Amino acid sequence: MSINPNPLSAAPDDWRAYSGVLSRRVMAFIIDYALVLLLCIPAAVLVFFIGVFTLGLGFYLYPLLFFIVAGLYFGLTVGGRAQASPGMRAVGLAMVRLDGQPIDFLTAIIHLVLFWILNSVLTPLILLAGLFIERSRLVHDLLLGTAVIRTGF
């Protein structure tokens, strides 16, 4: 059993890094989406002023507001130095790529979009897949070659 000295460089082989990850991911999801909804408030005010300044054209951003805020939130946090969103950090999780490369902004956005698409089609199967797939990975993790690990194992 080898423990990777830098747990964020690649997916470790230690089973403890994946113990309880699914339940922690659910909690991280709740925390992160609460934060995204809170961030939508100042973004909505900003869009209002953009709408006034552009004589109404900016108001067309309102239907896309949640997606823009969530995309920036996850792209900047998961694709950032910590490789985890604030919700993930709160429950002790981080995302890693299996090839050892860091998660970048684009990979974080694609991960989020795949999550939304797959969740809209296969809602209960997404979490059930994690019970049977190695390292408790979900379908969108498999498609991108990522894994979510515990940071304090």
Image (cartoon, grey):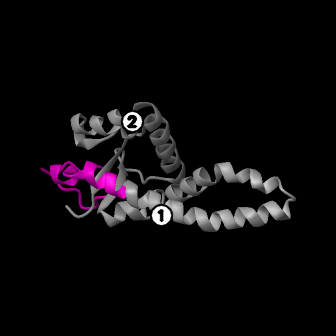
Q: Residue 35 carries which label?
A: 1
Residue at (74, 63) in percent of width and height: 48
The percent coordinates of residue 18 (x first, y second) are: 22, 50
Instruction: Answer with mark 1 or mark 2, whichever residue precedes in sequence.
Output: 1
Q: How far is mark 1 from mark 2, CA to CA?
A: 22 Å
The residue that mark 2 highlights is: 123
Residue 9 in sight: no
The percent coordinates of residue 34 (x first, y second) are: 45, 61
- What element does badge 1 sit on? helix
Residue 19 falls inside the magenta stretch: yes
Q: Contact (CB < 8 A) between labels 1 and 2?
A: no
Residue 51 falls inside the magenta stretch: no
The quarter of the rendered structure image containing the C terminus is bottom left
- Label 1 environment density (alpha carbons within 10 Å; few <14, some 14–19, many ≥20): some
- What element does badge 2 sit on? helix
Whether residue 59 sits left or right of residue 114 in the image: it is right
Residue at (32, 52) in percent of width and height: 25
- The stretch of residues the image draws in magenta is 1-28
The percent coordinates of residue 14 (x first, y second) are: 17, 51
In this view, the residue farthest toward the right is 55
Residue at (16, 53) in percent of width and height: 16
Tell me: residue 91, above or below residue 11. Answer: below
